[in-house]
Image (cartoon, helix red, strand yellow):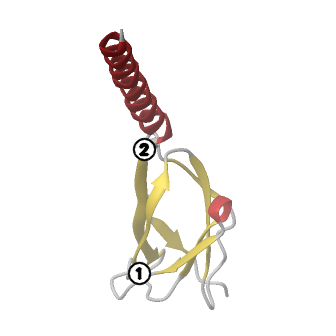
Amino acid sequence: MKTQVIILLALLMVGISNITAEEKENSKEATTTLTTSISGTITDAATGESLVGVKVVLKELNTVVYTDFDGNYEFPNVTLGKYTVSTDYVSYKTCESLSIDTNKSNALDISLKADL
């Protein structure tokens, strides 16, 4: 009788551990989200030259990056979705609401016009 109880408890423990492992795996799959990056180049609309130090804002995430020496910018690890990008640069017109849907594309090149 004592042996049967021990075997029964052992089988019960194995069953519980398998259920817990499956729940953890299912939970991990449910919380995995797809990410991408949003990147591009910002240039002068008249000359085509790259603009250095342009402030680029991803409004939904309240995140700011600045262009590098080649006019490139990047927002890494962005969850797939629709976002609004704006720019700010001295003596250039501000772009207020450029839209990008990362489900379709993750590249957004921008040409800024001089603010005369």
Camera sees residue 34: yes
Q: Nearer the viewer, mark 2 or mark 1?
A: 2
What percent of the width, then of the height, locates residue 62?
Answer: 66, 68
**Image point (41%, 81%), residue name:** 47
Q: For numbered disc 1, what is the local secondary structure?
A: loop
What percent of the width, then of the height, locates residue 45?
Answer: 48, 74
Q: For numbered disc 2, what is the local secondary structure?
A: loop
| Label 1: few (<14), some (14–19) or many (≥20) C-alpha neighbours in 10 Å | few
Q: Which mark is residue 34?
A: 2
Up/down of 88 relative to 108, above or below? below
**Image point (33%, 22%), residue name:** 10
Q: Which mark is residue 47?
A: 1
Closer to us: 27 or 4: 4
In the drawing, does residue 82 fall left or right of residue 8? right
Closer to us: 103 or 41: 103
Q: Which mark is residue 74?
A: none
What percent of the width, then of the height, locates residue 40?
Answer: 40, 66
